[in-house]
């Protein structure tokens, strides 16, 4: 197996585990936070590219601000465990993990199709 295949698989599985952690630990937000932090570190360390770290930070900040704050303050939905500005404290980590995993998966798949 090549290094890029292992790297892609690791990031893809970590992205899936990010989503799965929401369902496994749905009533334990501290476990969700811990798992998302660990998975985020695994994703960033697996990729080892500063551009993806920048994407992580952008999604970490802008994900909740753009996608959640307007809906929460308009009363369109609410979270069961609202800790910070009406959303859970693990949500920015979720956005960071999913964004980086998705971008990495799309770019490596696109590169693989070209080769």
Image (spheres, rainbow, N blue to C red):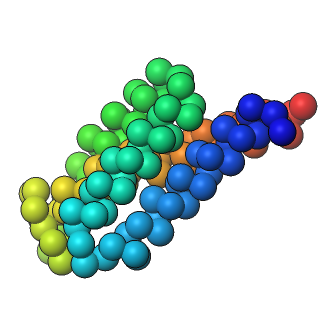
Looking at the image, residue 112 lies above or below residue 85: above
Tell me where residue 77 appears, x and y as whole percent. Answer: 22, 76
Question: Is 111 situated left or right of 80 in this image?
Answer: right
Tell me where residue 34 appears, x and y as whole percent. Answer: 29, 54
Say which quadrant the N terminus sits in. Answer: top right
Which residue: 40% across, 76% down?
Answer: 23
Question: What is the count of numbered marks?
Answer: 0
Question: Is 73 situated left or right of 22 in this image?
Answer: left
Tell me where residue 5 appears, x and y as whole percent. Answer: 76, 40
Which residue: 30% across, 63% down?
Answer: 32
Is residue 17 visible in this depiction of the protein?
Answer: yes
36 vs 112, nearest the viewer: 36
Looking at the image, residue 90 lies above or below residue 81: above
Residue 58 image-quadrant placement: top left
Tell me where residue 42 appears, x and y as whole percent. Answer: 48, 41
Which residue: 59% across, 45% down?
Answer: 11
Question: Is 11 situated left or right of 93 in this image?
Answer: right
Question: Is 53 situated left or right of 49 in this image?
Answer: left
29 vs 70, nearest the viewer: 29
Residue 28 image-quadrant placement: bottom left
Say which quadrant the C terminus sits in. Answer: top right
Which residue: 40% across, 75% down?
Answer: 24
């Amino acid at each position: 197996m090549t290094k890029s295949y292992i790297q892609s698989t690791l990031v893809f599985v970590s992205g899936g585990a990010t989503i799965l952690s929401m369902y496994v630990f749905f009533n334990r937000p501290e476990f969700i936070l811990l798992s998302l932090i660990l998975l985020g570190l695994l994703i960033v360390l697996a990729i080892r590219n500063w551009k993806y770290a920048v994407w992580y930070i952008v999604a970490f900040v802008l994900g909740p601000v753009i996608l959640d704050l307007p809906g929460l303050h308009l009363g369109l939905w609410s979270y069961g465990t609202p800790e910070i500005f009406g959303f859970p404290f693990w949500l920015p980590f979720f956005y960071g993990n999913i964004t980086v995993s998705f971008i990495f998966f799309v770019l490596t798949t696109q590169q693989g199709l070209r080769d």
